[in-house]
Amino acid sequence: MTENKAQKTKSGVVTSDKMDQTVTVMIERRIKHPLYKKYVKKSTKVHVHDPGNKCQEGDFVRIAECRPVSKTKSWKVVEVLETATK
């Protein structure tokens, strides 16, 4: 019996699209400092699988967790929410 787990999804900005079928996405979050009670921005960069090479630098994308595609890629692009204007 196989159960479908809910995929973890996050959104972020594409910071690099120089690799083939891979983009780098920066995910920003705001956390509250435990002592000073001030909100601080924290960011994480992840490599994301982009099979169609459709994402460009500056795009705002939604990504989902998936099985490991390579050593560093465990996320895939679900949709492009907003395209970058150049």
Image (tube, grey):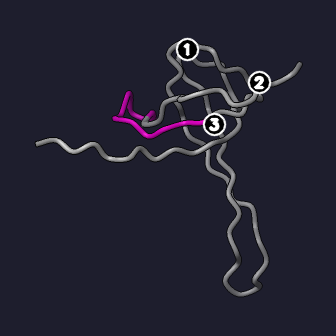
Residue designated by label 1 = 20
Q: Residue at x 77, y 24 (%)?
A: 83
Give the residue type that dot 2 points to.
Thr
- Magenta-drawn segment: 62-73
Vertical position of residue 62 compared to residue 54: above or below: below
Is-magenta flag for residue 13? Answer: no
Mark 1 or mark 3, which is nearer to you?
3
The N terminus appears in which quarter of the rendering?
top left
Coordinates of residue 10 in the picture (x, y in percent):
57, 45
Coordinates of residue 58 in the picture (x, y in percent):
77, 29
Give the residue type that dot 3 points to.
Val
Q: Residue at x 53, y 29 (%)?
A: 78
Residue designated by label 2 = 83
First along the sequence among labels 3 and 2: 3
Residue designated by label 3 = 25
Is-magenta flag for residue 70? Answer: yes
